[in-house]
Image (cartoon, helix red, strand yellow):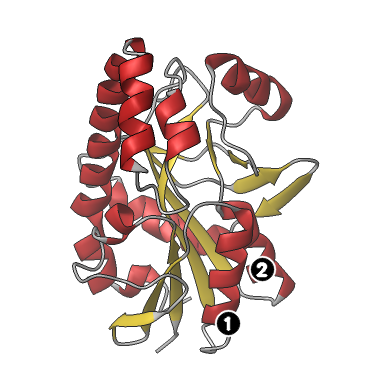
Amino acid sequence: MSRLGIIVALPAEAKSLYSKKLKIALPIEIQKDIFICLSGIGYDSAQIAAKKLLALKVDALISWGVAGAIDSSVNSGDLILPKSIINQDKQGLISTEWRERISDYLQQTSSRILTGNIASSKTICATVTDKNNLLAATGALAVDMESAAIVETALAHQLDCLVIRAVADNANTAIPEAVLDHTDNMGRPRIFKFVWSCLFKPAQIRELFNLARAYKISLKTLSSIGVDLKKEHFFYSDI
């Protein structure tokens, strides 16, 4: 059976596939021939995780987690199986047959499945203006910070690759200052500074609640499909 490597940025996203605690950049076999690696946020972190999985002789890589919408037609909880990942002027194509197999299966679920592109950014797309600018530049549906590194690594080593992203924040949602300035690479708040930021600028508290609600919806989408996809070896074995 083929060996799959899955990269997730944050612990909450990993829990949709594996309930136990993971150590950063330390791959774990969660099921026979399926490995998961917690990367942390960002291109460089995802690239390190991808290389850790390459050392385990995986045949394919999966980018799994959440994304932020930049197109107003996309809603929290939607699931995106992009045809390609756009990173600045480069475009990384996803394995077509594999993506279509999963898409056909997921059409039978309650999730809304989209196949438009995802833009991958090295910086947080924090404001509505940032999102509008990225939309204009790429025509993508959503943005994340890890998929480009994963797809580029897979293509460089002639591996199949797949991106599965559930949408958290909508295109009209800004990322609050407390999150931008006072959380670490694993999404954990630096408590004192985080709370002080909220007290100093209380208007962002409502934004934080909206963001948390959207994130919870996206995690529910991932959890709803994770068990069955693992059971079916992510529909990769027969490719």
Secondary structure under tag 2 reads helix
Q: Residues within 10 Å of mark 2 (few under 14, many from 20)?
A: many
The residue that label 2 is drawn on is: 153
Q: Residues within 10 Å of mark 1 (few under 14, many from 20)?
A: some
Q: Is residue 58 above or below residue 67?
A: below
Compare residues 163 and 46 and report the one nearer the observer: 46
The residue that label 1 is drawn on is: 54
Q: Residue furthest right?
A: 89
Q: Are marks 1 and 2 in contact (CB under 8 Å)?
A: yes
Q: Residue at x 56, y 62 (%)?
A: 46
Q: Residue at x 30, y 87 (%)?
A: 32
Tell me residue 76's x, y (percent): 32, 29
Tell me residue 47's x, y (percent): 62, 66
Q: Amino acid at mark 1?
A: Leu
Q: Residue at x 49, y 34 (%)?
A: 181
The tag on residue 41 is none
Q: Residue at x 57, y 30 (%)?
A: 125
Q: Amino acid at mark 2?
A: Thr
